[in-house]
Image (cartoon, rainbow, N blue to C red):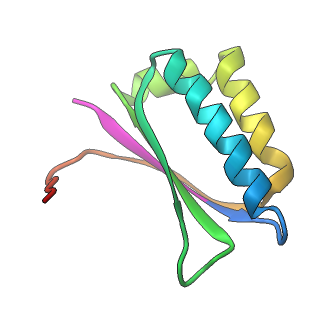
Amino acid sequence: MSVVEVVRVQIKEGHLGAFLDDVEVGLHGLLADGVPTSAEVLHGVESPDACLIVITWDSVEAHENYRSTPGFTAFSAAMGPHLAGSGGAEHYERRVSLTT
């Protein structure tokens, strides 16, 4: 069963555009490696300095193993200069998913 990783990050003032550009390039790189199966970034409406990075992995183990790869290291390093803080990361199992 796949797991969804949700990472909450705080973006430095004036860095949102550059953060979004860098994280998009980084997520394309992760997806090209074929380990995560999907990725998206959600930007806070009420908290415009906050973003959620949502990545689907085959398993927690697949994610943990991937964390030591050069691709993941580069992805993390690209985001670093734009971050004011992190609210942490958690993994979730999808239980209900509906679309219209």
Main secondary structure along the magenta-highlighted residues: strand
Quadrant of residue 82 within the rendered picture = bottom right
Any magenta on residue 46? no
Residue at 46% x, 50% y: name it.
90
Question: Which residue is found at the position 47% from the left and 47% from the top?
Answer: 40
Residue range highlighted in magenta? 1-8
Image position, residue 54 (x, y; %): 46, 48
Q: Residue 20 vs residue 46: left or right?
A: right
Report if residue 6 lies within the magenta region: yes
| Residue 11 horizontal side relative to residue 54, left or right | right
State which quarter of the image contains the N terminus: top left
- Callout count: 0
Whether residue 96 is visible here, answered yes or no, is yes
Where residue 32 appears, x then y in whole percent?
53, 18
The residue nearer to you, when weighing 13 against 4, is 13
Residue 54 in sight from this viewpoint: no
Indicate the position of residue 8 as horizontal and vertical percent values: 57, 60
Residue drawn at (64%, 76%) of the image: 48
Q: Position of residue 97 (x, y in %)?
A: 16, 53
Residue 31 lies, with reference to residue 94, above or below; the image says above
| 73 over 51 or under it: above or below | above
Task: Say which residue appears at 13% left-offset and 59% top-offset.
Answer: 100
